[in-house]
Image (cartoon, grey):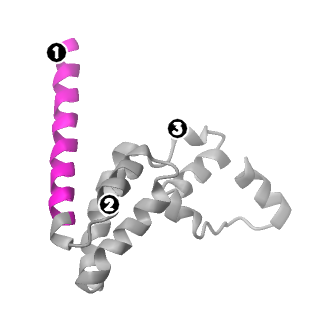
Amino acid sequence: PAARRCRPASGCSMRMLGRGVVTHPGLGLATKASINGIAAEQAGVGSPELLPLLAEFWPIVCTRLEGRSRAGRLKQWLNFLRRRFPEAEAAYLLLKTVNEPSLIDEWLAQEIHRHAAERLRATAQALVLA
C-alpha cells in the first residue's frame, strides 16, 4: 500500500528501496506485487529462498574480506534478517560466537544438505499422494 501512495505523492515512477532490502531481501518483489494489486505476502522472498541467498553471499564475503572479518559480516546480515525470518534467528544464535570461516563453511554445507533433503522428502511425499 505504501508503494502505491509514493507515485502520486512524489510524481516519480521509480522508487529507491535502500537499506530496507538488507532486512527484507524480497522487498523489491513485494513492492512490485503491491503496485500490481497482488498481496505482498504472495511475492518476495520467503524462508525457502533465504538459504540460497546466504549461500551466494558467503563466498562473496570470503573473496572480499580478510578471514577475521568474514564471520562478522555474515552474522551482521543474519542479525538484520532475524526480525523477519525465524530461521535467521536460529542461525544467528548458533553462529554468534563463531569466528572461524571454516566452521561457517561447514555449517552452511550442512544447512544446504539438510534443505535439499527436506525438499526431496516433500517431493517424494507429493508423488506418493498424487
* Quadrant of the image occupied by residue 71: bottom left
Sequence-first disc among 1 and 3:
3
Residue type highlighted by circle 3: Gln
Residue at the right extreme, as displayed:
9
Q: Secondary structure at mark 2?
A: helix
Seen in the image, is 106 located left or right of residue 68? left
Residue visible at 29% across and 77% down? 70
Query: Does residue 110 show up magenta in the picture?
Result: yes
Q: Nearer the viewer, residue 76 or 3?
A: 76
Prevailing secondary structure of the magenta residues: helix
Sequence-first disc among 2 and 1:
2
- Picture disc at residue 42: 3
- Picture disc at residue 54: 2
Give residue 69's position: percent from left, percent from top: 32, 81
Residue visible at 71% across and 54% down? 3
Residue at the top extreme, as displayed:
129
Query: Does residue 52 show up magenta in the picture?
Result: no
CA separation in Å, label 1 and label 3: 27 Å
Residue type highlighted by circle 1: Val
Crowding at mark 2 (Cα within 10 Å: few <14, some 14-19, many 20+): some
Residue visible at 53% across and 63% down? 21
Sequence-first disc among 2 and 3:
3
Can you tell which of label 2 and label 3 is closer to the viewer? 2
**Residue carrying label 1:** 128
Residue type highlighted by circle 2: Leu
Give residue 27's position: percent from left, percent from top: 55, 55
Question: What span is in magenta?
Answer: 104-130
